[in-house]
Amino acid sequence: ETANPLREPVLREVISVLQLSEGSHGLDAGCGIGLPTQLLAEAVGPNGHVTGLDLSAELLAHAEKLAQKAGLSGRLSFIKGNIEKLPFDDNSFDWIWSADCAGYPASDEPDKLIAELARVAKPGGIVAILAWSFERLLPGYPILEARLNATASGIAPFVSGRKPEYHFLRASGWFKKAGLVDIDSCTIAGSVHAPLDEKTNRAMISFLQMRWPNVRSELSEDDWALYQELCHPKSPDFILNCDDYYAFFTYTLFLGRVAD
């Protein structure tokens, strides 16, 4: 929820790209606390329905509470399950969506995962997967940011050691192997700039803390000191306090259609 001020505008733009049909029924595979699920439900309108699926009963319970609070519980349902073995019959949904989950790095064989998602989509239905793909968070400090991104923590979101063809930005190949057609992709950017409002500031602090954890042993003393100086909220030189602060991040979407 803390990151929602950063993610929601990007997610809304991505969902608009999909042009989901009014009244359609879809699956949010790996829904977490269900915030994208709510946006999908808004997109398909009051006659549509979205099913959120996740392995965590705790996250699903929270998702249900948030849906009720948003007045969308009638358009949403939440089910516990594994996206690699979906608890649904073939041809169950008009479209399938997965954000920050499918292939990133949910499966060691992402092409087979895409095939499983496609299995539960109706002929002609869309399968779409989305993930964060890039960012620039430390304006003016490109060398430090490059060194942070080269640490184990920095590389981890992109799955160090994985076969090159299994990295997320090669996902169009997974769709081809899964037999989907009309494969497409796009990248959409979100940005923030000074002055940051309170919610955006909290989201960016959370983002900075999440992005490079446990990096001290991989940095020089000078780089560690500079990192602390720029990224610790109590530092007098905390980078979010700069009156010219600017940062951006991107999400990349891959989609394909199940053959008729």
Image (cartoon, rainbow, N blue to C red):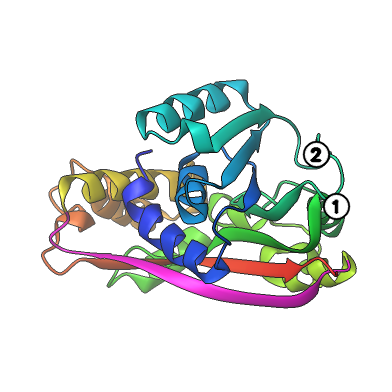
Q: Residue at x 63, y 75 (%)?
A: 185
The front one of 25 and 34 is 25
**Contact, mark 2 vs mark 1 (Cβ under 8 Å):** yes
Q: Is residue 161 above or below residue 71?
A: below
What residue would you read off at disc 1?
Answer: 119
Q: Secondary structure at mark 1?
A: helix
Quarter of the image for the C terminus: give it.
bottom right
The front one of 33 and 236 is 33
Determine if the magenta segment contains residue 219. Answer: no
Quarter of the image for the N terminus: give it.
top left
Residue 28, picture quadrant: top right
Q: Residue at x 77, y 58 (%)?
A: 162
Q: Residue at x 54, y 58 (%)?
A: 22
- Spot occupied by residue 128 in the image (x, y as percentages of width and height): 66, 61
Dot 1 amino acid type: Arg
Residue 86, numbered circle: 2
Dot 2 amino acid type: Leu
